[in-house]
Amino acid sequence: MSVTIAIPFYNAKKYLPDAIRSVFAQTYQDWELLLIDDGSTDGSLEIAQSIKDPRVRVIADGKNKKLAARLNEVTHLAKFEYIARMDADDLMSPVRIEKQLHILENNKNIDLISTGVFSVMNDLSLVGIRGNEHTTINFEALINKKASIVHAAVIAKKSWYLRNKYDESLAVAQDLDLWLRSASANDLNARTIADPLYIYREENNVTISKIIRAYDNERRMVRKYATNGRFKLLATIHLKTLGVKILNTLGLMGWLLKRRGNGVIEKKFLDDYWKVITTIKETYVEGLK
């Protein structure tokens, strides 16, 4: 059983090497790695092209098509039925691919699986852990925020992606739109596990502009997809938007970052986290400096 791992990147020179190392550090080694440049200008493409391994393919056309378009390309470029994705500024636990594939292979009805995350700052200092266990996820749970899927930690079947494409007109929240749209069509056989197998740089995403844009898109999706409780959902999103604006005015966005990561870290998880980071940092990739 083989898997395609895809990393679209744009100006990720600072973080891309460790993202790639975390792929090579996997306990499961039957993979191909797609590195898809989205018109980088900072030397990221040169980093990708420096890797000397036949399992790595670098795709570059000089264009800046944005994430949704690149993820749709991945579906057609992937050689294998299982597609794992990650963001270029993140890392993943060495056992991530092995554990997710094991569940998919033993539950043939599942099309998609995601994991919990270690929430970290840009310097990889640990903020917290988040993630929930859901054996089934339906439209109502998603629209009411009772279940969520960590987009970057997803492994899904290529056949599912061929049926369910990303909306390339959306600049943010393309993932939520995809989950809601597929769930409303009764085509989201998904599962999440709480194990923190993905290392997510929250700091890059907890900015006032990104959060406001995400909430704007959530309102648009509620109007588009929700049929029950629409007014309550819209009111809740408006209150969240107001709350974020107040936090930003008071200079308390850091509090929001810690809250997103739960802020509570047991010693066992802390020890495990730093073992994972050490393993990744020490992983040799030929051609990568």
Image (cartoon, rainbow, N blue to C red):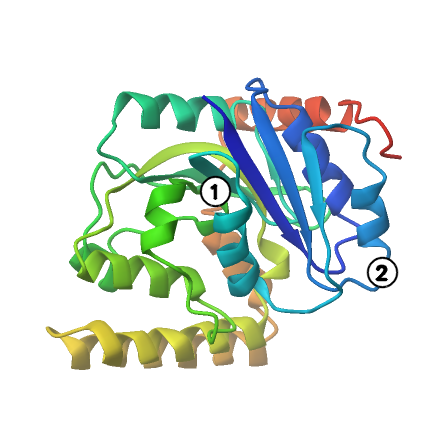
Q: Residue at x 16, y 59 (%)?
A: 140
Residue 76, relative to residue 171: is it above or below? above
Q: Residue at x 76, y 65 (%)?
A: 62
Circle 2 residue: 42
Left or right: residue 193 compared with residue 174: left
Residue 257, relative to residue 277: is it above or below? below
Q: Nearer the viewer, residue 162 or 15?
A: 162
Residue 215, relative to residue 18: is it above or below? below
The image quarter containing residue 279 is: top right
Name the mark on residue 66: none
Circle 1 residue: 153
Instruction: Say what secondary structure mark 1 lies in.
Output: helix
Q: Earlier in the sequence, mark 2 or mark 1?
A: 2
Residue 119 screen position, x and y as percent: 55, 45
Q: Residue at x 48, y 42 (%)?
A: 153
For this orientation, the residue located farthest to the left is 228
Residue 120 screen position, x and y as percent: 61, 45
Q: Nearer the viewer, residue 150 or 180?
A: 180
Mark 1 crowd level (few <14, some 14–19, many ≥20, 10 Å Cα): many
Real-space Cα separation, disc 2 to disc 1, in angstroms:
26 Å
Mark 2 crowd level (few <14, some 14–19, many ≥20, 10 Å Cα): few
Type of residue at label 1? Ala
The quarter of the picture where the N terminus appears is top left
Instruction: Say what secondary structure mark 2 lies in.
Output: loop
Q: Residue at x 53, y 25 (%)?
A: 267
Left or right: residue 212 compared with residue 135: right
Type of residue at label 2? Asp
Residue 82 screen position, x and y as percent: 43, 35
The image quarter containing residue 272 is: top right
